[in-house]
Protein backbone atom coordinates (compact mmCIF):
# COMPACT_ATOMS: atom_id res chain seq x y z
CA UNK A 1 0.00 0.00 0.00
CA UNK A 2 2.89 2.33 0.66
CA UNK A 3 4.28 1.75 -2.83
CA UNK A 4 0.85 2.37 -4.36
CA UNK A 5 0.61 5.69 -2.50
CA UNK A 6 3.91 6.86 -3.96
CA UNK A 7 2.89 6.20 -7.57
CA UNK A 8 0.85 8.46 -9.79
CA UNK A 9 -2.87 8.28 -9.14
CA UNK A 10 -4.10 5.94 -11.92
CA UNK A 11 -1.11 3.60 -11.62
CA UNK A 12 -1.22 3.58 -7.81
CA UNK A 13 -4.94 2.82 -7.79
CA UNK A 14 -4.46 -0.05 -10.23
CA UNK A 15 -1.61 -1.51 -8.17
CA UNK A 16 -3.73 -1.25 -5.01
CA UNK A 17 -6.66 -3.02 -6.70
CA UNK A 18 -4.42 -5.82 -8.00
CA UNK A 19 -2.93 -6.27 -4.52
CA UNK A 20 -6.38 -6.46 -2.95
CA UNK A 21 -7.50 -9.04 -5.50
CA UNK A 22 -4.37 -11.12 -4.83
CA UNK A 23 -5.06 -11.13 -1.10
CA UNK A 24 -8.71 -12.07 -1.64
CA UNK A 25 -7.73 -14.86 -4.04
CA UNK A 26 -5.24 -16.19 -1.47
CA UNK A 27 -7.90 -16.19 1.24
CA UNK A 28 -10.34 -18.03 -1.02
CA UNK A 29 -7.70 -20.64 -1.82
CA UNK A 30 -6.84 -21.11 1.86
CA UNK A 31 -10.52 -21.50 2.74
CA UNK A 32 -11.07 -24.05 -0.03
CA UNK A 33 -8.03 -26.10 1.00
CA UNK A 34 -9.10 -25.99 4.66
CA UNK A 35 -12.61 -27.13 3.77
CA UNK A 36 -11.22 -30.00 1.68
CA UNK A 37 -8.96 -31.10 4.54
CA UNK A 38 -11.85 -30.97 7.01
CA UNK A 39 -14.10 -33.04 4.73
CA UNK A 40 -11.26 -35.51 4.14
CA UNK A 41 -10.65 -35.85 7.88
CA UNK A 42 -14.37 -36.44 8.50
CA UNK A 43 -14.51 -39.13 5.82
CA UNK A 44 -11.36 -40.75 7.18
CA UNK A 45 -12.81 -40.78 10.70
CA UNK A 46 -16.04 -42.39 9.49
CA UNK A 47 -14.17 -45.05 7.53
CA UNK A 48 -11.71 -45.88 10.30
CA UNK A 49 -14.27 -45.83 13.11
CA UNK A 50 -17.05 -47.65 11.25
CA UNK A 51 -16.47 -50.99 12.99
CA UNK A 52 -15.68 -49.61 16.45
CA UNK A 53 -18.44 -50.10 18.97
CA UNK A 54 -18.57 -48.22 22.28
CA UNK A 55 -17.78 -50.34 25.30
CA UNK A 56 -20.75 -51.03 27.51
CA UNK A 57 -20.08 -50.73 31.20
CA UNK A 58 -22.71 -51.36 33.80
CA UNK A 59 -23.97 -48.52 35.97
CA UNK A 60 -22.29 -50.23 38.90
CA UNK A 61 -18.86 -49.93 37.29
CA UNK A 62 -19.43 -46.31 36.29
CA UNK A 63 -20.58 -45.20 39.75
CA UNK A 64 -17.90 -46.95 41.88
CA UNK A 65 -15.53 -43.99 41.87
CA UNK A 66 -18.29 -41.49 42.56
CA UNK A 67 -19.29 -43.24 45.76
CA UNK A 68 -15.73 -43.34 47.11
CA UNK A 69 -14.87 -39.85 45.90
CA UNK A 70 -12.21 -41.28 43.59
CA UNK A 71 -11.71 -41.51 39.87
CA UNK A 72 -12.75 -44.74 38.22
CA UNK A 73 -9.84 -47.14 37.67
CA UNK A 74 -9.88 -46.61 33.90
CA UNK A 75 -9.26 -42.90 34.41
CA UNK A 76 -6.57 -43.39 37.08
CA UNK A 77 -4.44 -45.31 34.58
CA UNK A 78 -4.16 -42.20 32.43
CA UNK A 79 -3.63 -39.86 35.37
CA UNK A 80 -0.31 -41.46 36.43
Image (cartoon, rainbow, N blue to C red):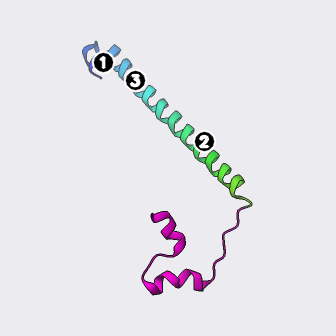
Can you tell which mark lies on residue 56?
none
Query: Which residue is labeled 2 in the image?
Result: 36
Can you tell which mark lies on residue 4?
1
Q: Which residues are magenta?
A: 52-80
Q: Is 21 or 42 nearer to us in this picture? A: 42
Displayed quadrant of residue 56: bottom right
Q: Residues within 10 Å of mark 1 (few under 14, many from 20)?
A: some
Q: Residue furthest right?
A: 51
Q: Is residue 23 left or right of residue 35?
A: left
Tell me the CA gap for discs 2 and 3.
26 Å
Identify the element where label 3 is drawn.
Answer: helix
Which of discs 2 and 3 lies nearer the camera? The answer is 2
Split into 4 quadrants, where in the image is the N terminus?
top left
Residue 5: percent from left, percent from top:
26, 19
Tell me which label, 1 or 2, sits earlier in the chain.
1
Are the residues tagged 1 and 2 within 8 Å (C-beta)? no
Q: Is residue 77 left or right of residue 51?
A: left
Query: Which residue is labeled 3 in the image?
Result: 19
Residue drawn at x 51%, y 76% is: 72
Tell me the CA gap for discs 1 and 2.
35 Å
Q: Residues within 10 Å of mark 2 (few under 14, many from 20)?
A: few
Q: Residues within 10 Å of mark 3 (few under 14, many from 20)?
A: some
Are the residues tagged 2 and 3 within 8 Å (C-beta)? no
Residue 59: percent from left, percent from top:
59, 84
Displayed quadrant of residue 2: top left
Residue drawn at x 35%, y 22% is: 16
Tell me which label, 1 or 3, sits earlier in the chain.
1
Amino acid sequence: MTAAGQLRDPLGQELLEVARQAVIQGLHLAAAVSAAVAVGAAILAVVLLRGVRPSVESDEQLNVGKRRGECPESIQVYAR
